[in-house]
Amino acid sequence: MQIYLLSAIGLLTFWLFCDKSRWRELYPSAMFMTYVRFVEQYILVEILHVWTYDNLTNPFSSYMNTPVIVDLFFYSSMGYLFVQKWPLRRPARLFYVVGWALLFTIDEYIAVLHGTIKFKAPWGVFESFMLFVTALVLLVIQYEFYSRKFKINRTTDPKTP
Amino acid sequence: MSYLVLFGLSWAAFYLLIDTKRLQELYPSALLSSFMGIFTDLIMVKYNLWKYDSDFFGSLEVPMLLDLSIYPVVAMLYIQFFPEKKSWAKRIFYTACWVLFSISLEWIFLQRGEMEHHMWWRLWYSFGADWIIYGILYTMYRVLKSGMPQEQREEETPLHGRS
């Protein structure tokens, strides 16, 4: 149930809050967020088994051991929105990253409480939080790299807000 | 060991051939290629259509190595040298060369016993899949490029490597 809810939240968020006019600039960030999730699932779930998914009910569960629709719809939208709203000031950026990482961690903790995710020691909520912080920092780094040209264009073109 | 050599050769090709001034433009293609790679790898863990074998790495580690080397590098090279201003026939011939390169590499790994096909998967399906993958890479590149800032498009120097 949580898997479908998160996927719906992801799609609704994209529809309601994401700036579609900037999709060429922000699409790599959406893809990068899902890509990082896939890499995490591959290394941490399939190779190292630091957590497992139980009772997966998503449509691809007979083909994959991971909640793929959450990674495809929820995390891509969140990555898009996260970068779209990236603050300009440095202290705000710190709280922004920590806030988003906390939201993702709470979502994951709910899945742990429902028994969808089972952590294997020594992995726990703190490690998940640090993993989300790392993913978000990487997301920002790749965005800063890719969007440099778009930013130059925005600052030199007086017509562009 | 072959996969480690392939990893090294891929990044050597990146160092020698990629036009670093176009990295921002090529980056989405590299990411998309790696993304498609890891997505299929996640499926292949459970739905075992093909499997890698290596003396040096476990069968699950090899795909990760490929996702972080040959897939993104080949995607960048394919896009960088794409003959955009040439005829459709030349573009198709160019893509066919890359498909041939990819399928030959897969055939070599199959012959060496470092890769196995299972169930209904055949080399011909890989051949078809390669055309689709290169098609997706080029289509996404075109779509993104059409909306890039003019300044960036003017800087592009197709068919030229690092100068």
Image (cartoon, coloured by chain):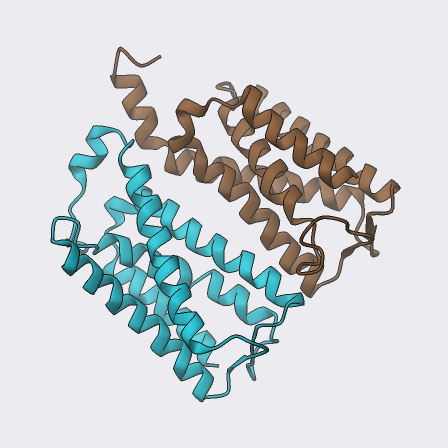
Residue appearing at x 67%, y 54% in the figure: A60
Residue A34 placement (x, y as % from top left): 56, 44
Pick the residue in front: B36 or B11: B36
Above or below for B131 versus B102: above
Q: Colour of chain B?
A: cyan
Residue appearing at x 26%, y 34% in the figure: B146
Which quarter of the rendered picture does the C terminus of chain A lie within?
top left
Q: Is residue A81 among the parts visible in the rendering? A: yes
A90 displayed left or right of A56: left
Pick the residue in front: B70 or B126: B126
B102 displayed left or right of A131: left
> Farthest residue toward the front?
B120
Residue appearing at x 79%, y 52% in the figure: A123
> Farthest residue toward the left?
B86
A21 displayed left or right of B82: right
Residue A78 placement (x, y as % from top left): 59, 32
Which quarter of the rendered picture does the N terminus of chain A lie within?
top right
Residue appearing at x 67%, y 29% in the figure: A9
Residue A43 placement (x, y as % from top left): 64, 60
Pick the residue in front: B119 or A47: B119
Q: Spot the brown chain and give its letter.
A: A
Residue A152 placement (x, y as % from top left): 29, 25
- Residue B61, image quadrant: bottom right
Total labels: the figure holds 0
Q: Is residue A94 among the parts visible in the rendering? A: no
- Residue B153, image quadrant: top left
